[in-house]
Structures are given as structure tokens and as C-alpha cells.
Image (cartoon, rainbow, N blue to C red):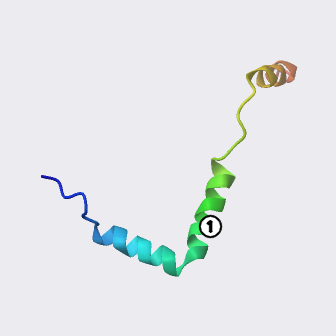
């Protein structure tokens, strides 16, 4: 039987750490926005941009 109430020592540590250092969580969110959160790709616009590039 699996104990669904178990919380690892690592998880407890991280939860306490992030509560005591909220700037870390804010930095994580900003980093994610910078690297991953992008506008959806408009395929028609992308195709036009690719067709308008100069061929090398």
C-alpha cells in the first residue's frame, strides 16, 4: 500500500527554503519567462518571413 501522505526530507527542505527566500522563487519565474514563455507561432507569418529571407 502506498502512503500518499509521505513527504520526503528534500521536499520539506525546499518548501522551507522557498518560504524563507521568496526572491529565489521570483527569480525562477523570471528565468522561465525569459527562456520558455513565448508567444504562439503564427505559421502564416513564419512562412512569409522564411520566404522573404535572402538566399545565401
Q: Position of residue 9 (x, y in %)?
A: 29, 72
Q: Secondary structure at mark 1?
A: helix
Q: Position of residue 30 (x, y in %)?
A: 66, 61
Residue located 50% across and 77% down the image: 19
Crowdedness near tag 1: few (<14), some (14–19) or many (≥20) residues, C-alpha within 10 Å = few
Residue located 12% across and 52% down the image: 1
**Left or right side of 12 for 55:** right
In the rendered image, which quarter contains the C terminus?
A: top right
Residue located 70% across and 34% down the image: 40
Of residue 41 and residue 53, the one placed in the foreground of this image is: 41
Reading the image, the residue beneath label 1 is: 27
**Left or right side of 17 for 44:** right
Residue located 66% across and 47% down the image: 37
Q: Position of residue 39 (x, y in %)?
A: 72, 39
Up the image or down, 34 lies above or below 43; here it is below
Up the image or down, 46 lies above or below 31; here it is above
Q: Position of residue 26 (x, y in %)?
A: 62, 68
Up the image or down, 36 lies above or below 21; here it is above
Residue sitting at the far left: 1
Amino acid at each position: 500500500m502506498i502512503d500518499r501522505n509521505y513527504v520526503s526530507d528534500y521536499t520539506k527542505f525546499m518548501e522551507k527554503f522557498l518560504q524563507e527566500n521568496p526572491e529565489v522563487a521570483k527569480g525562477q519565474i523570471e528565468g522561465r519567462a525569459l527562456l520558455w514563455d513565448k508567444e504562439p507561432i503564427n505559421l502564416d507569418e513564419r512562412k512569409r518571413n522564411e520566404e522573404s529571407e535572402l538566399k545565401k
